[in-house]
Amino acid sequence: MADDTLSSVFTRNAAKFSDDVIIKYKKAAGEPYSDLTWRELFGRAEAASLGLIAAGLKPGDRLAILSS
């Protein structure tokens, strides 16, 4: 397991724990918490990565993420 990457560990966990909740979050203040499963999070990550590839991002390119 010394050669595991973050991506490979994430993919393996998404398959192993697919229906388990990994994140609880609020969509808006005052609203109840919503659950996000490993399967849903993997789907969102995959969609984001495919979008970046479609936009022309290639291995070795750098990407900055701004968040508030």
Image: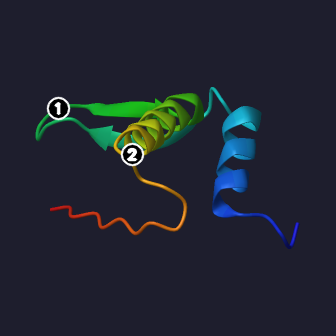
Please provide percent x and percent y for residue 37.
53, 32
Which of discs 2 and 1 lies nearer the camera? The answer is 2
x, y percent for residue 30: 11, 37
Q: Nearer the viewer, residue 49 or 61?
A: 61
Q: Secondary structure at mark 1?
A: loop
Residue at point 68% right, 44% down?
A: 11
The image shows a total of numbered marks equal to 2
Nearer the observer, 66 or 13? 66
Q: Quadrant of residue 12?
A: top right
In the displayed structure, 33 sits above or below 19; it is below
Residue type marked 2: Leu
Instruction: Report helix, strand or loop for mark 2.
Output: helix
Which amino acid type is marked by label 1?
A: Glu
Q: Residue at x 51, y 30 (%)?
A: 43
**Image quadrant in which you'd find residue 20:** top right
Label drawn at residue 56: none
Name the residue carrying label 2.
52
Other residues around mark 1 within 10 Å, as few (<14) / some (14–19) / many (≥20): few
Is 58 on the left or on the right of 19, as rendered?
left
Q: Residue at x 20, y 61 (%)?
A: 67
17 left or right, relative to 25: right
**Label 2, label 1: how many angstroms apart (C-alpha)?**
32 Å
Q: Quadrant of the N terminus?
A: bottom right
Q: Which residue position holds label 1?
A: 31
Cβ–Cβ under 8 Å for marks 2 and 1: no
Name the residue furthest right: 1
Looking at marks 2 and 1 on the same chain, the residue that comes earlier in the sequence is marked by 1
- Considering the image in quadrants, where does the C terminus appear? bottom left
Q: Position of residue 33 (x, y in %)?
A: 30, 35
Nearest the camera: 27 or 68?
68
Please, which residue is most extreme toward the bottom here? 2
